[in-house]
Amino acid sequence: MSKTIDNMSSVRPDLIEKVTGRAEYITDLTVPGMLHGFVVRSPAVHARIVSIDTSAALASDGVVDVLTGADVAQFGLWGLVLKDRPIIAIDRVRHVGEPIAVVIADTVEIAENAAELVDVEYEELPRATTIREAMADGAPLIHAHHENLQDFYFKGGARPTQGSNVFHTYRNEVGDVDAAEATAAYIHEDHFTFPGISHFALEPHTVIADFKGDSLTIWAGAQTPTAVQKVLSRLFGLQLARIRVIVPFVGGGFGGKASVKIEPLVAAASWKVQRPVRIAQSQVESMLTCRRLGADITIRTAVDAKGRIVAKSAKLLLDGGAYSDTGSAVATKSANRIMGPYVMPNLRLEAQAVYTNTIPGAAFRSIGGPQAVWAKESHMDNVAAAIGMDPSEFRLINLASRGQRTRPDLRALDMDMSELMGRVSQSFGTEANASNRKSRGLAVAATDPANTPISNAIVRLKIDGSILVSTSAIEVGQGSHATMGRIAAQTLKQPASAVTVLRTDTAVAPYDWGTGASRSTIVVGLSVEKAALDAADQILEMVADVWELPKESLSLVEGGVSIGAEVLTFHEIFHRTLGVDSGEVIGRGAITPRSKKGALVESPLFWETSAGLAEIIVDEDTGEIHIPHYASAADVGRVINRVAAEGQDEGAAVMGFGHALYEQLEFEDGQPVNANPIDYFIPRISDVPPAFDTILIENGDGPGPGGAKGMGEGAILPVAPAIANALFSAYGIRITDLPMTPEKVWRALQKRN
Amino acid sequence: MTHHLPISFSLNGEAIAIEVPTHTLLVDLIRDRIGLKGTKRSCDMEVCGACTVLLDGAPISSCTTLAVDVDRREVTTIEGVTPADGLSRIQEAFVRHGGLQCGFCTPGFIMAVTALLKAKPHPTDDEIRHYLHGNLCRCTGYIKIFEAVKSLA
């Protein structure tokens, strides 16, 4: 470590490993005796499997075995909310890219070549490839029946409609929307659509599984290792204690590696050959594995004569793809996230998630959020324009204030949205130039993260003052390991350099729900703080007992315990207490729904909020949108690591630019058209606005350590509607489906003229 | 049948003589045969830049370069620009400015910036954007990467 870095007390240890190329990701690991699997995938959109002939593949030199549905039918189906998924296609394929067979061989090359020899005969079935087709009368049923798994992954479950493709319906109604609309001064309704979007983590899904008799070890870039453990335990009938999930550094997740993805498939391949098997997907394969849910949204607002919202209703249809994964939760959240930080005395929400014969939907940064906020905030400007009010003014008079509830069953707002709006506006300077102001668009968001308050941590203080922290939080780039280390160090009053955070390994780390929903800093952070306090208490107890001093007179200091006049080193304490010059104390911290007198139970634990202000210039000859300036604000309670926190929000916002301007997984009658890195565009460095303001609001009012709130998912939300609102304000065109491609904008401009 | 060719090249200053199948890609030679895992494999299509290495000092995608094509040439990987002790000034700038999160794209970026600063020790903003156009990052939004490079310009 160089001298200058040594002086950077806030440096994240993981960054040093990563810039040098020494950081180990799942794709860098090998296990002795490891074989390689290559997946044969369905080219069919929806088909019955008539036959699979693996004989030619099996006869190839170096091929050890081939796994097919016949092998795994005995294990039944798996799922997170609905049990709807076979380990590998058994008698039917439901989307292009669905695994049909795994060729297991000595090398990837042999497996890949032999995969071409697997002969599958399909009989096409009627397909439903869009929300509309899937909900039509007489639509082909993609799943014959629906089995809900209550409280399995999230609290609650799905509400499927048997005999239909609807796998979840969520409704929430407050007051009387019909009565309010009957007396309203004005009612406005809009319709928006949102496409499926690829996670596009730079590291594609890769898993190594080692099945030995009744035990199983999995190396995976999994965001929720304990969910992987649970699903595999149920599927294969193994004790949880005999399933070990190890998660090295994860090369990007964004939800695409949350819940469970290809782990059952790789585990089954290893089960079949009883040797370690690795499947390293290509980026193309990962693009066929999961995606953000597309949406079709109708939203309606009724206002009184003064422009105050008297009723709001929304109906959201989510395209869940061929398997539900956590799509039901995405649908529920999309309904909650379409409300926004507004006072809505009468409210009617309905969200449904629907199976289609396309790539399975999955969690993706702020589940259901970008879909909902795209519709809600575009709609707000439409309503404002229709009643002749400035869109900011329209928002301000309808904002719920701090401490006010937007819906009776949700926690009161813990922030002030007008502060965020003021800050983004301020960052643009005070120039009153009217034409400049007109080319700006604003959008705001308030979302309810599902940060399940269940976590455990272990903090071990060793005789030499070094500290070992163990949690199931994974390191996916967000800096959670450094954050956990810092919380432990601060709580135990020891330097950051004394702390080592262990790589995530369920054999060592205690249970935690998983990494996602902006929860780690808060929920896992609180458990680490508690574990560190427990360790501190034990060491103080030791001194009080052995030195016969009142515990209140003792305090932790760097390297030991102060007993007033002198400092006892940890060495002295352990040596005298244990009689040998060795030892450690093991602190345990648990967060449950009962922690903090139940204060963590009410949902959401905190509101994740953001505001975005975009200035745009459109090339009217091409329809291309340029964004010279963007400001993003989020209320984060307290910043723990400024560079990392800003980076989280900047990354989210730029991902939002991708959603807004470029990204859409296209399907033609169910066939993916652009599911490859060449035809699918994510933002490049040249697409980032030259002026970009990142504003983090800190009022120390969050539930996390030091008043922190979770973060990292909010800034993606306002981007698309802010740009669309600027287009509407400056150019008089309203785009209602994403992405806002040059062609779409150009056509709208032509139509306007 | 697979055809093999002997090649000899310099890898991070070290002479390598090895026989490779003619269809072997440089990324696989570096990672799987030689065992230097710092170079990352992602898109396989010369789109993302994660596998960037330097060939005679110029950045190339090792995922679409045949190993036989580096015969008698110089290849530099992330391991070759990392000092035995500590960090290079580029690596340090990335750490200091937070120009990375998950880190999977980072070795590729470090290599591209190494080439950029060699070609243009004081790049303009546009030159930075142009040079790094071929490296994708899904985590950072590029802002802190840009700041890191800018601090060296």
Image (cartoon, helix red, strand yellow):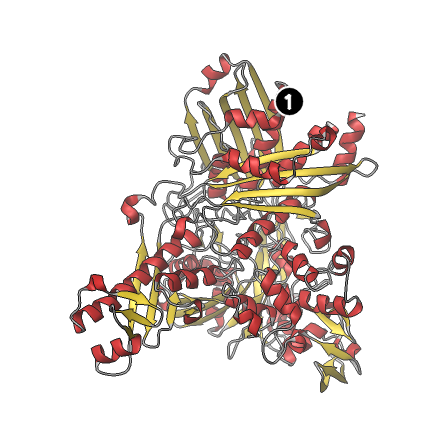
Residue lying at the far front in this picture: please name it: A565
Where is residue B57? Give x, y as percent. 77, 74
Foreground of the two, A63 or A157: A157
Foreground of the two, B118 or A290: B118
The answer to whether residue A641 is above or below residue A716 is below
The answer to whether residue A270 is left or right of residue A734 is left
Q: Which residue is mark 1?
A: A385
The answer to whether residue A299 is above or below residue A429 is above
Q: Residue B9 occupies which quadrant of the picture?
A: bottom right
- Residue at x-position 28% and y-position 83%: A581
The answer to whether residue A625 is left or right of residue A511 is right
Where is residue A222? Give x, y as percent. 49, 60
Which amino acid does the dot numbered 1 rest on? Ala
The quadrant in which the C terminus of chain A is found is top right
The answer to whether residue B152 is left or right of residue A242 is right
The answer to whether residue A419 is left or right of residue A38 is left
At mark 1, the secondary structure is: helix
